[in-house]
Amino acid sequence: MVIELSQAMVVMDKMAASQNIPAMRKVQAKTKSRSSRRLIFLLILFFITILLLLFFHSSYSRITSIEILGQIYVSEESIKEASGIELNDHFFLVSPEKIEERIEAIEIIKDAVVTKQFPGRVFIDIEEYPEVAYEITPEGRPEAILANGSAVILTDQSVIIDKPILSGWVDQEMKRRLTETLANIPDSLLADISEIKPNPSRSYPDKIMMYTRSFFQIETTIEKLPEKIKVYRPIIEDQLEQNVNGGMISLLEIDRFIPYPEPEETKADSGEGAEAQAEQRD
């Protein structure tokens, strides 16, 4: 009996050892640790959500100012209306690229750059097409002609006309080509040009006639203008040095100068003077 009892105790010891009681305690500890970390993560996420909700309902998440820079002819109201944004709109939901596209749809605006500055400030920097010429309306009011051919009524009647005046332009596409060309010519080269008219021919559909403040006419084409505009001033200076006050400058395939014909009265006076001098010599 004693031997059987000892054998039974040995078997029970082996069974207890095989159950590995300490390992079960480790599994329980790991499970508690994971649950704690998950609870902490959920609490942090909850507080972050609350903070975000509070922030997006506060004034810090709203547009508090819209500043427009660089415009000359377009009013601030027109730009704000085209932008599609208003004060108190959500600051972070505003797309600068979309605002730029909407503003650049305005005809006389060449470029728009929109930047955001936290908290709540939006800057709209405008670049309009530059002035290249003027026109006078049938009512006698001056208009500024921009590089893309657009016309802007000048409200200031005391404006100084310091660029060429366009007259007689019915073909709007040809006019647009001219204004785009003028935009790439320095003001110094256009300073003496007072007026530009269309003067098309079969050979030169884009031929123009320019009039200078020094009483010369210049015949050229829109296509040749950027190259030929550099030639006319030396020709005029040379003629003025020779006391020739006016004439036609042709700047087409060949550059040439044709003086104005003398008035008939001047010719008659010159003839009478010559006859009188001949009688005196006789």
Image (cartoon, rainbow, N blue to C red):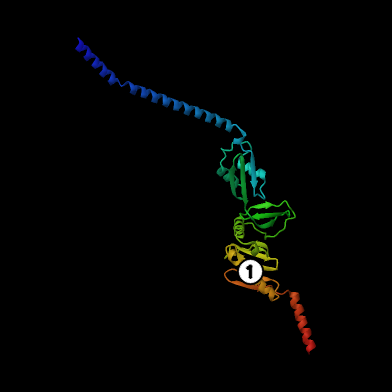
Question: Given the image, on which type of amino acid does mark 1 rest?
Answer: Tyr
User: 44 or 117, which lies in front?
Assistant: 44
Q: Give how far across and how far down residue 226 sits, in percent.
A: 59, 64
Which residue is farthest right? 280
Residue shown at the point (62%, 44%) measured from the top left: 123
Which residue is farthest front? 2
Residue shown at the point (64%, 40%) measured from the top left: 65
Q: In which quadrant of the rendered image does the N terminus lie?
A: top left
Q: Give how far across and how far down residue 85 sits, in percent.
A: 61, 39
User: 21 or 111, which lies in front?
Assistant: 21
User: 195 or 156, which lies in front?
Assistant: 156
Q: Give how far across and how far down residue 125 sits, in percent.
A: 62, 48
Helix, strand or loop under label 1: helix
Circle 1 is placed at which residue position?
A: 232
> Vertical placement of 156 versus 189: above or below?
above
Q: Give how far across and how far down residue 174 sits, in percent.
A: 60, 58
Q: In which quadrant of the rendered image does the C terminus lie?
A: bottom right
Left or right: residue 149 compared with residue 27? right
For residue 201, say whether it is visible: no
